[in-house]
Every structure is written in structure tokens, then in C-alpha cells.
Image (cartoon, helix red, strand yellow):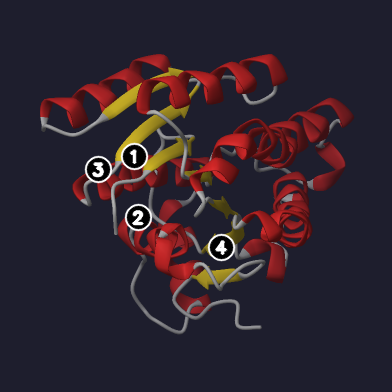
Amino acid sequence: MSKRVVIITGAAGGLGADMAHHFCQSGHAVACVGRSSERLHALAKELTDAGHDAIAVECDLAIPAQIEAMAETVAQAFGGIDVLVNNAATYKLRPWLEISAEEFDHIISVNQRGCFLTAKACFPYLKKSGTGRVVNIVSNTLFIGWEGLMSYVSSKGGIIGLTRTLAREIGKEGVTVNAVAPGAIPTKAEEHHPDQDEFNKKILDFQSMKVRGTPGDISRAVAYFADEGSGFVTGQTLIVDGGGAMI
């Protein structure tokens, strides 16, 4: 496809960094967005040193003004925005009775409200693109439930509702909105689980495929929804989890 301008939130993490590499290697311009300044800027430098078009933009998705400024910065740097990948997320692993109201609100704010506000800030540019794409990263846990992740799973379930409703609202503008639901992909995020061997066994027992997925599996799914040729697919959720949650 032709060169696209792609925003990836949460780009400093394992999935986000792989997406940034994937889109750059496919010839696109990438804005790496996140709060982790050291890792974020290191990623952008790695990409530009390799000859790709990439910038780092620091942004706290809990602050609307920063989101609006981020969208404007990217549009000015690259001349527009064609693809928004809402990948940023946070979670805490704990029993639901130990989750405070403040912690629950924070996770909803970053994971779910952040998607809403980022899509809203980027929409004028996505509409102008003519083939704008929004891809929201959710999770297979929302289809199965997952003990200890009440606030995270709740936020991801809300993003499915956002995906479908937004697809209805902006489809007439030529902008598609879809979601990718990864299974458990080995990244630093798994360090939340205290017993790594037991967690790995639990995942493999759950999956139909007896191998762990990779960040590249998710990047390729996201790239499909970001493609100009996927313009007749919207409001959908693709589960990429080795046949764990089959609905």
C-alpha cells in the first residue's frame, strides 16, 4: 500500500515497539507515542538510524490537552494522520476486592477513555485521509474473564463497545474502526505474574496451538486492518491467541 502516517500509542512496550518496526519496515511514517521518554526516544532513534521516518511524542493519555497536542504535532510533522493504533494500556494483577476505586478509575481512564479521546483528537485528520483507520488493541481476556484482572478486563470490554459504536458513527466518512484481541504474548508485561513457569503452562494448556505467540503475530493482524484495502471491514474484533478464546 502507499505510504501511510501511523500513530502507535504505548509504543515503548513490547507489542507497540514491534508494531513500530513493522510499519516502518513496510515503508510508512510512524509516530511513537507514550509516557516512557527514555525508551520512547530510544525506539524512535533506532528507527531513524535505520533510515525510517519516525518521531517520538510524549503524551499522557489521561490528560486530554496532551492528546490533542500530540495529534497536532504528528499531523504537522508528517502532513496528516492515516492510521491510529490505540495500543497503550496499564493493568494491576490483584483480587477484585483489593482494587480501590481510584485504581479502577485510573485503569479505565488510560485504557478505555484514552482510546476515546485519542480517536476524537485524530478524527479530523483521519477523515481528511480518505482511508483513515483506527485499530484498537483489546484482549482475549474479555471473552473468557481472567481472575485477578477485573479492572483491566472491564476496560478492554468497554473498548469493544467503543469500537462498534465508533465504526457506526464514522463509517460514512470512510474511516474504519476495528480491534485486535491478543492472547498472552511474551513481553515484559508478563512479569506481573509471580510464577512464570506456572503461567506459561497455564497459557499453553488453554490454547489450541501449543506454542506461545509473538509480537509479530499481533503486528501483522494490526497491519491488515490498517491497510487501504481493508476498507469494507469495520466494527470487527480479530482474536489472535492461538485458538484460546473461540467465539
Q: Which mark is residue 240?
A: none
Mark 1 or mark 3, which has the lower sequence index? 1
- Three-letter code, disc 3: Cys
- Three-letter code, disc 1: Ala
Q: State the CA–CA distance, disc 4 to disc 1.
A: 17 Å
**What residue did someone put label 3 on?**
24
Let me know if residue 85 appears in the view.
yes
Give coordinates of residue 23: x percent, y percent: 30, 48
Q: Secondary structure at mark 4?
A: strand
**What residue did someone put label 1 on?**
17
Mark 2 or mark 1, which has the lower sequence index? 1
User: Are the residues tagged 3 and 4 within 8 Å (C-beta)?
Assistant: no
Q: Quadrant of the C terminus?
A: bottom right
Q: Answer with left or right where residue 143 lies relative to residue 154.
A: left
Mark 4 or mark 1, which has the lower sequence index? 1
Marks 3 and 4: which is nearer the front? 3
**What residue did someone put label 4 on?**
181
**x 72%, y 59%: residue:** 160
Q: Secondary structure at mark 2?
A: helix
Characterize the local packing of mark 2: few (<14), some (14-19) or many (20 or more) Cα atoms within 10 angstroms.
some
User: Are the residues tagged 2 and 1 within 8 Å (C-beta)?
Assistant: yes
Give coordinates of residue 214: x percent, y percent: 33, 60
Marks 3 and 2: which is nearer the front? 3
Q: State the CA–CA distance, disc 3 to disc 2.
A: 15 Å
